[in-house]
Image (cartoon, grey):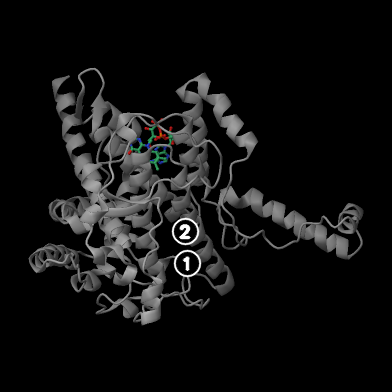
Amino acid sequence: QCNNPTGLIGDSSCCDYETVGKLNVDFSAKLAEVVSMPFFRYFKVNLYKECPFWNGAGLCMNRDCSVETMDKSKIPEKWKSHNLGKVSMPSSLNQPFGMIRPVKPTIKEQEFCVPEEFTDEVYVDLKDNPERFTGYSGPSAAIVWKAIYEENCFDVSKEMTAGCHYCESERKKLEEQQQRHKDHQHGKDEEAVEEMENNILVPPEPAPMKPHKPSKREMEEIFSRVPKGKGGLQQLIQDIADDRNPEESCLEKRVYYRLISGLHASISIHICDEWFNQTTGEWGPNLDCFISRVGMHPERLENIYFDYVVLLRAVTKISDYLAGYEFCTGDDNIDSNIMNVVNELVGLVKKCPPTFDEKLLFQGDHKGQVQKLKHQFRDHFRNVTRIMDCVGCEKCRLWGKVQTMGLGTALKLLFSYDEESLQGRKADGVLTRPEIVALLNTFNRFSESISAIERFGVMYQNRLDQE
Ligand code: FAD
């Protein structure tokens, strides 16, 4: 049951699981080196924003949930400014996500990007705050995961969502509304006429995209099931997961689901890999935790590899830019040290076979619908990053923010830039420092997950041998 996945990763990835396992041997060592350097360890984050979607996110009071912040004076001035990377977003609609072409920032733009140091923002040394078991669980965590999976509904036409079961009901509602509107125009639907007269007819256009906010009823439903034991809650979330992962759903929805499920599984692996044993008071890997949360669910294992190839593709796409990046620590020796390690990483990336073909996504004859799907995909993912403010454990929130920003940065690189616009680019405005830090730390976290899968595999085999 706990065998490592084999065969093609699929869904726009032409890579196989075994290749990823082999590539990761070199990557894991190099990434570990990269993220241990101050440039990639110091992360600016706002951990104290209110949850924008529901009240009472609840705060985990465990000691392991808390985050140690840094003394800001340790941060080189250059890193505090946004000057090191400004993204310009033309609103052209006929390019993916409004295809971004990096432009040389004008002085005005640079000034605009000097950060407003909000009092709530803090710097965190990621190395001092490892992502691991914190004890955060129960309804607060489950509602966050539920909300994240619920972002997987794309409200586009029948053609684009063919096979996407989840949106069926949404689409039906919309069609009914449209029909009622037509009937009204032909004077057939008296109720609609009355509604119109009372000025309450909902316009037939799809409602503008807005974050899913669990209703009071939904919240009550979840909470009411919790006391009945873990099974009830697990079943509920599983139902959502199953619903989001229909066998024949459209590619974009599958990709979205796999990204989220892979992130969820990767976080679970980190929890199981650095588990706190309350009986012995020691930290260490917990094989049973791994088996029950990830190992016995092949698709969750596979989705971790899926995120890995997406991240690797993004890092490949940005590799020339990374190689020319000015790290500006204020110390030339440290700068050249970082450059050397990053160049070694770029060297590894360049040797990789192609792992993911983003051009296979968002294809179709109906340009308007394709564009709409792309925008929804982006907006839903943005919402996932906002949902992180609802995570009721500071440390989980920190790493949730790092990794959703890392994946979001990867998606931006894949779908908002074409090869040509990135080719030979240097540090003249592709990504901000936090985005680079998040991207490489996220890649490292997935790399660690894949290494952990190998280790857990050995532990599992040893256990079998002893039985
Ligand atoms: P959960 O992981 O909460 O999962 C809920 C349900 O979702 C499962 O029962 C299952 O039906 C389904 N599910 C689980 N995994 C997948 C998957 N990969 N794909 C599809 N469906 C799935 N806890 C820590 O100790 N340390 C952390 O750093 C940490 N970070 C977190 C970050 C975020 C953003 C969130 C939302 C939670 C975090 N947590 C963390 C909590 C942790 O993820 C779990 O929620 C908690 O450990 C309870 O786990 P569980 O076994 O009840 O199932």
- Examine the rendered structure and indicate whether residue 394 appears above or below residue 60: below
Tag 2 secondary structure: helix
Image quadrant where residue 352 sits: bottom left
Image check: 227 left or right of 346? right
Mark number, residue 403: none
Label located before the other in sequence (1 or 2)? 2
Query: Few, some or many C-alpha atoms within 10 Å of disc 1 (few <14, some 14-19, many ≥20)?
Result: some
Q: Is residue 355 visible?
A: no
Residue at image coords 56%, 31%: 222
Q: Which quadrant would the C terminus be assigned to in this image?
A: top left
Residue at image coords 49%, 51%: 248
**Residue 449 percent location from the top left of the image:** 25, 44
Mark number, residue 252: 2
**Residue 162 percent location from the top left of the image:** 57, 57
- Examine the rendered structure and indicate whether residue 336 appears above or below residue 1: below
**Residue 423 percent location from the top left of the image:** 27, 79
Image quadrant where residue 284 sits: top left
Q: Say whether mark 2 is within 8 Å of ligand 1.
A: no
The amino acid marked with disc number 2 is Glu
Image check: 220 left or right of 113? right
**Residue 124 percent location from the top left of the image:** 28, 49
Q: Which quadrant would the N terminus be assigned to in this image?
A: top left
Q: Which residue ends up furthest to the top in the rendered image?
A: 279
Q: Which residue ends up furthest to the left in the rendered image?
A: 333
Q: Name the quarter showing ligand 1.
A: top left
Image quadrant where residue 453 sits: top left
The reply to whether callout 1 and callout 2 are in contact (CB within 8 Å) is yes
